Amino acid sequence: MTSPSHHDISDILSRHRAGPGALLQALRQVQARHAHVPPAAIDALVQHWGLSYAAVRSVVSFYHFLSFEPRGRYTLYLSDSVTDRMQGSEALLQRLGERLNLPADSTRSDGLVSLHRTSCTGLCDQGPAGLVNGRPLTNLTLRRMDEIAALILSETPLDAWPPDFFAVSNPVWRHNLTLGHPIEPGAALRLALQQGPDALLQALREAGLRGRGGAGFATWQKWQACRLAPGPRAITCNADEGEPGTFKDRMLLMQWAHEVIEGMTLAALTVGAHQGFIYLRGEYEFIEPHLRAVIAERHAKGLLGVSILGSPHAFEIDIHLGAGAYVCGEETALIESVEGKRGIPRTRPPFPVDRGYLGLPTVNNNVETFVQVAQIAVHGGAWFSAQGTPRSAGTRILSVAGDVGRAGLYEVPWGITVAEVLADCGAADVQAVLVGGPSGRLIDASQLQRQISFEDLPTGGAFTVFNRSRDMVDVARQYTRFFEHESCGFCTPCRVGCSQLVDTAERLWRGHASQRDIDRLEETGMLMKQLSHCGLGQTAANPLLDVLAHFPEQVSRRLVPDAQAFDLAAATASMEAPQ
Ligand SMILES: Cc1cc2nc3c(=O)[nH]c(=O)nc-3n(C[C@H](O)[C@H](O)[C@H](O)COP(=O)(O)O)c2cc1C
Ligand code: SF4
């Protein structure tokens, strides 16, 4: 870390087009260079870009990876996902803290190093995992923690650390329609230019493709609505992938970037958009150079730029890095973030297809959706819909993690049963499966014949397995803490509801809750579902409610009578009261 000079800050700002849209990207670079956002940088943004102090400060305070206070020259984030904890991340954190003489979530007074927990880093198949100055750390062990501590204490530059510390693999255990059929760069675009947008929309309709980000909206309908709205228009690719347990987009971005960008370009040709963004979660910063190289290669081949394959269509793609905020995966929060603001979800309607990025009609799709669009454009709708179920056509990629023999990626036909996936990934002694991450559904071992499909158990891609040694109340407690940590705080039902849920989950876990608390928890969950402004608050109670429904014995054996719970709560509050 160097001390911030006026020249240095001006240098960073000069690399961006002045204005709110570039604010988050500029702040990220200031943070990377100075390990915080110093007052001099805020002054410069106010003076040179005409922004208000409030606007700049509110953005810094919103994103977890930005800070007003200096962090260490080495800034470590250990992934605090449930699966990382199952693999011993807390012991690793403690070990590293001991070696560095530093408690978790703090910075050493000499400014050498900071140590933090962070929400899931998208590496659950190779955890325990973490990040150091934006680079991924995988397969962490106690021994590796000792080695990392020694490298930090000797101030060894990251480029001189053993490269295998940063190795990210993408184990694919099951290939099907998508992962078995890579396409030549430009093949789908050539066909689309020959056949016209109506033919592609018809193919997507015939394919029955529904968005892979979770909600499952019909892709052709979304594109058609955007096309009919008055232009100009924009495209965003949702590569935020923050749902704990999901990592399939990481693999697609690392190994299928041509298909992702081909799909985005097809969207641009179809709806008439000239501008596109890949919103890449901050934790995936390490993939950015690869994406930029693919974008450059496609420019050189005429697949992006002013005249795509010699046609009158122009389309440019930029990469917008997030800075650690799960809620930015919600599509309107994502658009706010691309505009450089805090990622607060917008009121809908209007939907992004009518008013999205800078008020322009915008198509937003998940990474996997774009890949499948490109393949449908080449192979046809019938090829895709030959697999799956009536309302869930084709295949989808599952990120399988937790208590399994083979964690990694499985491309499965929709309609497959949970039991079939478990057999495939070598899971034994299964107690519970979380389908779709904590915002999805947790099922017990009596429900393993249920289908993964929009008709039964939809999923944005996560499939996390828990064996019988796991304490499901603790699992639900940790996921609830995740939601509380990631709530943007904009609306009361979610802000207050999440903190009440965490309070009850903690007391339940400690054996301090009564039946009255459980009744209140159910009421709170219902209110959050009905009244929260976005999907985060609407689903935040799911893990606890599912544990109540499917593991009642794990709950009831912890409950105490009402009066005792009251006494315990009062005793705890007086112990925690400030002196
Ligand atoms: C809190 C929250 C987080 C979300 N995170 C993601 C995400 O990381 N990736 C994603 O594609 N969709 C995510 N979504 C869903 C998006 O809002 C949106 O439905 C999706 O990007 C649309 O693309 P699709 O039609 O291709 O699925 C999230 C939604 C919510 C409420
Ligand atoms: S539901 Fe939660 S995350 Fe969504 S807007 Fe409200 S406070 Fe923010």
Image (tube, rainbow, N blue to C red):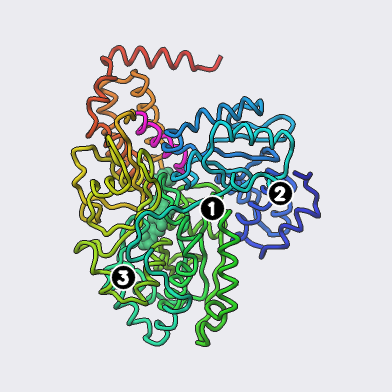
Instruction: Of the two numbered discs 3 and 2 on the same chain, state the one appearing first in sequence.
Output: 2
**Viewport quadrant of the C terminus:** top right
| Residues drawn in magenta | 473-490
Q: Is residue 430 above or below residue 373?
A: above
Q: Which residue is pictured at 35% across the width and 33% down the height? A: 476
* Residue 20 point in image, percent of width and height: 61, 59
**SS for dot 3:** helix
* Residue 379 point in image, percent of width and height: 33, 76
Label 3 crowd (10 A; few <14 / some 14-19 / many >=20): some
Given residues 364 and 402, the one toward you in this image is 402
The residue under label 1 is which amino acid type? Tyr
The Cα–Cα distance between marks 3 and 1, rounded to whole angstroms, is 30 Å
Given residues 165 and 452, the one toward you in this image is 165
Magenta stretch: dominant secondary structure: helix
Identify the residue position indicated by label 1 in the image. Answer: 284
Label 1 crowd (10 A; few <14 / some 14-19 / many >=20): many
The Cα–Cα distance between marks 3 and 2, rounded to whole angstroms, is 44 Å
Q: Which residue is pictured at 31% across the width and 34% down the height? A: 467
Q: Is residue 455 above or below residue 558?
A: below
The Cα–Cα distance between marks 1 and 2, rounded to whole angstroms, is 18 Å
Answer with left or right where residue 558 lies relative to residue 579: left
Count of residue discs = 3
Report the mark closest to the observer, 3 or 2: 2
Identify the residue position indicated by label 3 in the image. Answer: 221
Instruction: Of the two numbered discs 3 and 1 on the same chain, state the one appearing first in sequence.
Output: 3
Identify the residue position indicated by label 2 in the image. Answer: 33
Q: Quadrant of residue 131?
A: top right
Q: Quadrant of residue 115?
A: top right
The residue under label 2 is which amino acid type? Arg
